[in-house]
Amino acid sequence: MKSMIKELWHGNIIPQEDSRNNSKEMKELLGYMARHHEDLEKTFTDEQKEIFEKFHDCWDEYVSLAEAAIFEYAFRLGARLTMEVQSDTNE
């Protein structure tokens, strides 16, 4: 069995990519979003397109920071759960 830590270190495990598009519902939703995005952009003036691009840049940065925070929290939670199971002091 391969070491998960080594696989993570070498970039063979990429949680933010592996978890993003794995459900049918998420893929469907992404398709709807792309279609609506294209339809909306067709109606924009050049100035509105520029503002919309800036909004997207900010949104992408926010999502990246949020995903990192969620990953860190979930990783720590999993580690704490593992420690509790390993210690088994309550029984």
Image: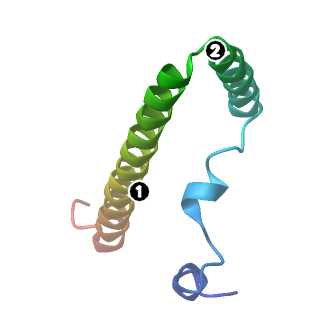
- Tell me which numbered mark, 1 or 2, is placed earlier along the sequence: 2
Residue marked by disc 2:
40
Q: Quadrant of residue 75?
A: bottom left
Residue at disc 2, secondary structure: helix
Asked if labels 2 and 1 touch by Cβ distance under 8 angstroms, the answer is no
Residue 89 percent across, percent down from the top left: 22, 67
- Residue 71: assigned label: 1
> Is residue 75 placed above or below 1 in the rendered structure?
above
> Residue at point 31% right, 55% down?
73
Q: Is residue 43 left or right of residue 71?
A: right
> Residue at point 31% right, 63% down?
76
> Is residue 60 placed above or below 5 in the rendered structure?
above
Q: Quadrant of residue 46?
A: top right
The residues bearing labels 1 and 2 have C-alpha atoms spaced at a distance of 32 Å
Farthest residue, direction front: 46
Q: Nearer the viewer, residue 44 or 68?
A: 44
Q: Nearer the viewer, mark 1 or mark 2?
A: 2
Q: Nearer the viewer, residue 30 or 76?
A: 30
- Residue 79: assigned label: none
> Residue at point 69% right, 30% down?
30
Image quarter of the C terminus: bottom left
Residue 2 percent across, percent down from the top left: 67, 87
Amino acid on which disc 2 is placed: Leu
For label 2, the crowd category at 10 Å Cα-Cα, with few meaning under 14, some 14 to 19 and many 20 or more, is: few
Residue at disc 1, secondary structure: helix
> Is residue 51 placed above or below 90 in the rendered structure?
above
Residue 13 percent across, percent down from the top left: 62, 72
How is colour applied across the structure in the image? Answer: rainbow
> Residue at point 42% right, 32% down?
55
Image quarter of the N terminus: bottom right
Residue 72 percent across, percent down from the top left: 34, 60
Q: Nearer the viewer, residue 14 or 90?
A: 14
